Image: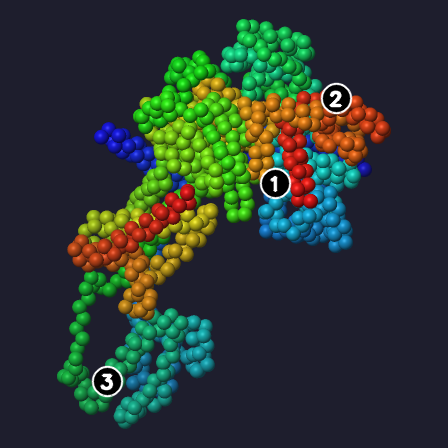
Amino acid sequence: MSEIAIAAEGFVKRYTRHEAVRGLDLQVRRGELYGLIGPDGAGKSSFMKAVAGVLAYEAGRLTVFGHSIDSERSAEAIKGRLGLMPQGLGQNLYGDLSIEENIDFFARLRLVPRDEAAERKERLLRMTRLDAFRDRPMKKLSGGMKQKLGLVCTLIHAPELIVLDEPTTGVDPVSRRDFWSILAELIAEQGLTALVSTAYMDEASRFSRMSLMHEGRVLAEGTPDDILGRAPGTIVECEASPQVEAMKRLGARFEQVEAMGTTLRLFVPESDEASARSEVKAALEGCEIGSLETHEPELEDVFVALLGKETGEASADTPRPQALDAESASSEPAHSTGEGVDPQQRLAEDGSVATERDQPAYAIEAQGLTKRFGDFVAVGDVSFRVRPGEIFGLLGANGAGKTTAIKMLTGILPPSGGEGRVAGADMRRAGSLIKTRIGYMSQAFSLYLDLTVVENIRLYAGLYGLSRSERDQRLAWIIDMAGLHGHETDLAATLPMGLRQRLALGCALVHRPRVLFLDEPTSGVDPLGRRAFWEILFRLSRVDGVAMLVTTHYMSEAEHCDHLALMFAGKVVADASPAEMKRQVTEEAGALYEVAADQAASLVRPLREAGFASVSPYGRKLHVLTREPEKLSEVLKNAGAAARVTPRAMAMEDVFVHKVSQLEAENRKESA
Amino acid sequence: MNDTRLWWMLALRRFSVMLSKELKQLSRDRVLLLFILYAFTVDIFLAASGVTLSLNNAATLVQDADRTAASRELLGRFREPYFRITGEALHDRAALAALDRGDAMVVLSVPDGLGRKLETGEPVQVAMQVDTTNSVLGFLATSHAQEIITRFGLESALARMGLGGGASANLPAVENEVRVWFNPNQEDSWFMGISEMLNIATVFAVLLPAAAMVREKERGTVEQLVVSPLTPFGILFPKVVSMTGVILVGVAISLFVVLIPLFSIPVKGSLGLFFLVSALYVFTTAGLGLFAATIAHNLAQAGMLSILIIAPMLFLSGAWTPPEAMPEWLRGLMLVSPLHYYLDIAFGVLLKGQGFAELLPSIAGMTSIGLLVFGGGLVLFRRQFD
């Protein structure tokens, strides 16, 4: 038997209008968990479908288990030995069938002998902890459960190779970790080979080897550590004031600079900690530097750095911040310099001017906001406040109630209880004057896809009553800001996701709102696009003093916010700044340590038994929260494992997982 | 009153951008445009030229057991345009089989001895079997046949009494002198063409606003509109106005491109009045589309709901059955179908040349029901945002 499960050489997939994969070379060994990481449109799905034998390709060679996949017939020969789970939550399942019926259907479809199927079904249901819900229809499952069921159905005929296309997209972090650990367990137990794609860069450490993909090409290939080594450098996080000035200076000198709440985060290439520190200090000469910390770069930094090397320039459609400066300078001289912006200056175009007295202390206020749909409580007693000029993040999984909360605040849905106030007014009863103060960018960037870029902008300008000259001025600004030059007469439907997202933002900003609601503004957008987007939001909040409520399920994005509310099952379970949240968790459960070992997954149980409450698998490593690192090393030594324990900086994901597991434990205790 | 002026200016600006948005969206939906064009031209052409309510060339089989001059004379009278003799059935079974297969609609059997009995003055019967699957055509075939045979019997009787030729003119008889008004040649194409045009206008009046609204719901764009300073009425009014405009253009195309040049439909009354009433009708009927859009979650549901709404409207319109022929309880329902009034008005204006004064009751009826429908649709539509 050959060692190689999948081999591709010069693989090319062409669609009528574009080349999806341009010469891909890779080898997947048996028993590997191989990752394809890259944003939407990188060519992951096309390649995976070709491997599964359901998509023809144009050039190159592709062999699976030694069979060349070049025709329908040859693909047929290996189809019994592999399983494919397509992209999308529950996409290959039947919504009206129960968990058990779905599994039975796939077992019969694959002609699995009855006894064998029954035995395997029980084992898989137990492993995925779906056995308690076997009669529940698929459509009523949560996103994480749907994906676990999809995995079970893919595995019911005991394939040797499974191909999973973005199985964790849109799933909450706790379920995501759960999914990965189940997958790791299966691979270890059954000698499976898995080809898995993901758009989350932070999931990379879970793969044995991987390819980092962008626009149909491989940027880097190897183990996660190999790839991290491709772009050596140091991440510096510092607090400096004035923040906008510091950002401008750093931006002039370094390629990758991001604002994360009150701190700035930048990548200093080809440098160790000490030299990075001194470089940054030199760049910030004259600014007041608060704190300054250094870290190792993460995969996303490496991705952006590699992409930068490859293309020379960051990306054609990435807007440069200068565009915003230009606007501020030309039309808003008062706002371009300082942070203290009078939010009342830009008011409704209705012509009336509100007085200072109208200005409330909070831009957005939710007090006991509740929404019930029948018996189901979508949002339960949620309260929070957002100050003018603040970026407030509502963080939670799909179905946690984020969108419902936003809809109640913007007046789209009436609350069942409590009150939401925006700019001091209840949006349900607010007149058009108040409505011109807020902007809203809904989920999936609901633009008119059959209108062009310019027509979309003009439509919203008209709706908000802008005059012709104002409209043209804003139009130019939006085209600049969103980097839409050359796309003015394109239909919105033809734009790539990143551009579509920024066009939607532009439309939401056309009337210069004081308060901005953004519902999952970055889902489906690549890291470069996401960074550019957050840079725009940062400027809007700091320079123009716009208050923002942002929802996201990307945990890594939460760090961009000044303040966070963590939502779980319709409730706010934590409400603080990101740093504060991490501090609280450290106080409650200790610092974060990473355990690296050969068979890390097998160490979970002995560690839990030894009293470590917060142990979760993280790729091939473990993340443990503890106050007693010495005891941790000791227990590991006693367990006979050659493990390496290193302290790590806590990420938002660790905070979320900790909070939610804590809550789930409490719920279990209550119901018991 | 600067404020009021400003308010109106903004409202007008919002209305105009929404209106142009709707028209642009529609103009980019090629499939829908083609469908609209097809419905207002080809479909109406087919309805006007193909569908007829009279008996034409009914396939007739004869069975002549008599084979005399009299029997040949009788059978010879079954001829075009009503009947067409397609052959002779040699056997009863063959005749029945032809009826079963649908090869013949009428089978006429002349018994042995017809000629002889006529001469001796004995009463005599001929047998006619008719396929009345289509009850209207069956009825027409029977009555035409009845007439032919009665006349033949009368003439035979007169001939036997020695009164040949034009003798029948001297008999005391009541003649029915008919004057046909409004459609002198009694062309079915006029009636069918116009009523199909009105039906199509009704279908689109319900379907187009429903589709336009549901598309926004599906895509999520309606939320952007709700958050903007637009009121629910401000969202919906430009949609209904633009769709009304499109349908009126369609009606104009079918009138000026199909019905008037190809079928010589006379426009006796005022075209202005006709289009005014049509605008009012289409606009108010859009309320039913809003109703469908409020309930439906996606385009497919909206389409099916619209069919459910449109079907009874067409049945109760009086286009297919005059109100007098309906059972009493259904006649009451007809009074609430706006299409019923619209049909009356349209035929009145186009064929009868009626003016506003004559049509006032119908216009009043249509307007009041239309306003109720539109108001209801509007209230329902607004409620989904509360």
Residue B122's x, y, as percent?
Answer: 29, 93
Q: CA distance from mark 3 to mark 2?
A: 120 Å
Residue B2's x, y, as percent?
Answer: 24, 28
Q: Report the disc number at residue A646.
A: 2
Amino acid at circle 1:
Gly
**Split into 4 quadrants, where in the image is the N terminus of chain B?**
top left
Q: CA distance from mark 2 to mark 1?
A: 33 Å
Q: Chain of mark 2?
A: A
Q: Is residue A623 left or right of residue A528?
A: right
Model colouring: rainbow
Q: Which residue is mark 3?
A: B154
Residue B155's x, y, as percent?
Answer: 23, 84
Amino acid at circle 3:
Leu
Q: Residue at x 70, y 25 (%)?
A: A590
Name the secondary structure under disc 1.
helix
Q: Chain of mark 1?
A: A
Residue depth check, mark 1 versus mark 3: number of the one nearer the observer: 1
Q: Residue at x 28, y 62 (%)?
A: B188
Q: Is residue B259 above or below residue A320?
A: below
Residue A271's x, y, as percent?
Answer: 66, 11
Q: Which residue is mark 1?
A: A143
In this view, the residue in front, A349 or B194, is A349
Q: Is residue A546 left or right of residue A671?
A: left
Q: CA distance from mark 1 to mark 3?
A: 87 Å
In this view, the residue in front, A335 or A288, is A288
